[in-house]
């Protein structure tokens, strides 16, 4: 059976001593964590390892000896290091030595009973970067080309090695400058990594989180007040994109300010992604606000809004005049055509009058709306979407009028068509049943069918035109909401971590052969395979609170054909991940 010894690269230049680590009997593997070099007292080493076991819950023990023959006087230690196997009860006893003036290493195992090398057991020496393995998080495999059981077995073996190093942080908190009786060599033996800025941020985050929690609780009480539950306010609050986005960000702030510690790596990464997303969102919003208020761009935007509204109204009036004539050479029902055209022209007149009535206040409204960008770019985009919805409300009304009239005629024609065939729709059983009609019913049905059939082209043309206009507005709003969802759900911290420190997000490992020689242990270098960017986004993508119709293209075309209204409203209770 092959014996695998995972040896940290930082210990390759350590002085001679004993190897401490974890023995994984299921894999016949030894994970070396540190080297205890001379001088030391065996009783103190055992006491120190028992304290480490109580904290880390890992069976850390002395696995063998390490000999670095850099000087001739150290060669006399080889016999002494071999005799240490009688003091520290572990089987097999691993002996690793670095040959002087040579790149080759020797590795052998001793049985305590016979005290002789096990030459029949092949040894594989695997080097690993202790710092990268400790800081990385091993993700489960996502490749579906291999067997599921085989992937799970390999993942569990790697997870045991990664968990051993990650859970031994207490072992790496001592360096060579400590006054303790035991001197260790590991990745932090030259000094524990720390940052003064990070420590100051940790100290300042406690009062900041307490203040933020108080403010959020106050805002939550205001949002849940009865004033917002009355019908007009509750209806508007449920339909506006801005209110939904503010509620979404409020939940994000509650997650960040929570004093509850993250239970696992996924929750920790979620908090970090939310924090970075909020930070970048607010930074982009402040940049947008500074751009809007520079060089009086708000005033220029307000001055251009009225001419744009007049131009759109003129184009709609020209379109209606075209429909009231002979559009594309089609002969329409003149009476119905004139009624519908004048009805919609009157709505345009009312809308333009309303816009001109609000013109003195538009600049002030835009000035105050621009201040909302300090809450984040997503809030500003949602306000823009709501403004577009309000400015195109007359187009929505045209679409609703045309769709309802067209739907009424379609369902009327389908009911009268069943009357000709001697059938009717059974409302209770939700099916078509046979029915006998008398002569008067058939005569009246024929008249109504003829009237609806000849009026259908005129109604269908108006419905088609206003549906296309409505879909154009919905597409613009949809693009804005897609951008909002991209900012809300994109795991920016994970992507930055994958870009700068790819080893932190490990998908697996790969091995590179360093040395292979007869009667020498095979030496491999273990390197971390990072997650792909697509997998990072898929794994750490934040949940969104935008709700879109879950209709397929077939269902959407069916609704358009039968005149059913297509609502782009947000429906609560349908949370989408």
Image: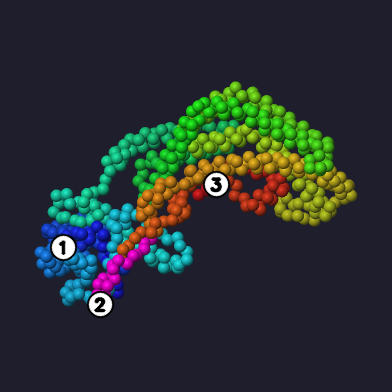
Using a 10 Å C-alpha cutoff, classify the residue at mark 1 as few (fewer than 14 neighbours), some (14 to 19) or many (20 or more): some
Q: Which mark is residue 324?
A: none
Looking at the picture, does residue 324 appear above or below residue 85?
A: above
Q: Mark 3 against mark 2, which lies toward the viewer? A: 2
Residue at image position (39%, 56%) is: 530
Residue under circle 2?
120
Q: Which mark is residue 70?
A: 1
Residue under circle 3?
574
Q: Mark 3 against mark 1, which lies toward the viewer? A: 1
Q: What's drawn in magenta, residue-wise?
A: 508-523
Query: Of label 3 and label 2, which has the lower sequence position?
Result: 2
Dominant SS of magenta comes to strand
Quadrant (top left, top right, bottom left, bottom right) of the N terminus: bottom left
Q: Is any atom of residue 141 visible in this view?
A: yes
Residue at image position (58%, 43%) is: 478
Q: Whole-Å distance between the Cαs marked 3 and 2?
A: 63 Å
């Amino acid at each position: 059976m092959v014996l695998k010894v995972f040896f940290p690269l930082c210990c390759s230049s350590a002085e001679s001593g004993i190897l401490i680590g974890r023995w994984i009997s299921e894999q016949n593997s030894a994970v070396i964590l540190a080297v205890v070099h001379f001088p030391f007292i065996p009783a103190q080493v055992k006491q120190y390892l028992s304290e480490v076991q109580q904290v880390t819950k890992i069976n850390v023990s002395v696995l063998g000896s390490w000999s670095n023959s850099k000087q001739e006087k150290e060669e006399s230690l080889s016999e002494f290091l071999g005799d240490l196997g009688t003091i520290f009860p572990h089987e097999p006893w691993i002996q690793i030595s670095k040959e002087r003036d040579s790149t080759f290493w020797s590795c052998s195992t001793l049985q305590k009973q016979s005290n002789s090398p096990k030459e029949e057991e092949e040894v594989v020496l695997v080097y690993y970067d202790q710092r990268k393995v400790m800081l990385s998080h091993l993700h489960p495999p996502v490749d579906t080309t291999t067997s599921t059981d085989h992937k799970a077995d390999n993942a569990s073996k790697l997870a045991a090695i990664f968990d051993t190093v990650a859970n031994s942080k207490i072992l790496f908190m001592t360096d060579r400058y400590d006054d303790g009786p035991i001197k260790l060599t590991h990745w932090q033996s030259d000094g524990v990594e720390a940052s003064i800025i990070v420590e100051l941020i940790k100290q300042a985050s406690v009062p900041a989180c307490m203040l933020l929690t108080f403010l959020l609780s106050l805002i939550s009480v205001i949002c849940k007040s009865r004033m917002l539950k009355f019908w007009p306010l509750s209806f508007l609050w449920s339909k506006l994109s801005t209110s939904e986005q503010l509620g979404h960000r409020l939940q994000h702030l509650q997650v960040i300010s929570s004093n509850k510690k993250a239970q696992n790596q996924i929750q920790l990464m979620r908090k970090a992604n939310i924090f970075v997303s909020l930070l970048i969102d607010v930074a982009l919003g402040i940049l947008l606000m500074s751009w809007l208020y520079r060089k009086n761009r708000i005033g220029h935007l307000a001055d251009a809004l009225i001419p744009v509204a007049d131009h759109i109204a003129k184009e709609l009036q020209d379109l209606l005049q075209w429909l009231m004539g002979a559009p594309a050479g089609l002969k329409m029902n003149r009476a119905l055509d004139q009624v519908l055209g004048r009805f919609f022209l009157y709505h345009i007149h009312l809308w333009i009058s309303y816009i001109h009535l609000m013109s003195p206040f538009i600049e002030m409204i835009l000035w105050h709306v621009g201040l909302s960008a300090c809450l984040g770019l997503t809030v500003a985009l949602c306000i823009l979407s709501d403004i577009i919805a309000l400015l195109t409300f007359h187009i929505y009304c045209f679409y609703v009028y045309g769709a309802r009239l067209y739907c009424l005629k379609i369902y009327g024609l389908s009911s009268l068509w069943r009357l000709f065939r001697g059938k009717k729709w059974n409302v209770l059983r939700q099916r078509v049943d046979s029915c006998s009609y008398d002569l008067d019913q058939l005569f009246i049905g024929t008249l109504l069918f003829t009237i609806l059939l000849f009026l259908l082209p005129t109604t269908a043309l108006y419905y088609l035109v206003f549906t296309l206009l409505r879909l154009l507005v919905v597409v613009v709003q949809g693009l804005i909401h897609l951008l909002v969802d991209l900012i809300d759900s994109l795991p920016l911290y994970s992507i930055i971590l994958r870009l700068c420190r790819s080893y932190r997000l490990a998908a697996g490992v790969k091995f590179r052969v360093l040395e292979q020689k007869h009667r020498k242990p095979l030496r491999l270098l273990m390197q971390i395979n990072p997650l792909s960017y697509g997998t990072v986004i898929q794994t750490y993508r934040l949940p969104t609170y935008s709700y879109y119709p879950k209709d397929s293209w077939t269902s959407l075309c069916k609704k358009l054909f039968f005149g059913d209204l297509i609502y782009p409203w947000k429906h609560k209770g349908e949370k989408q991940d």
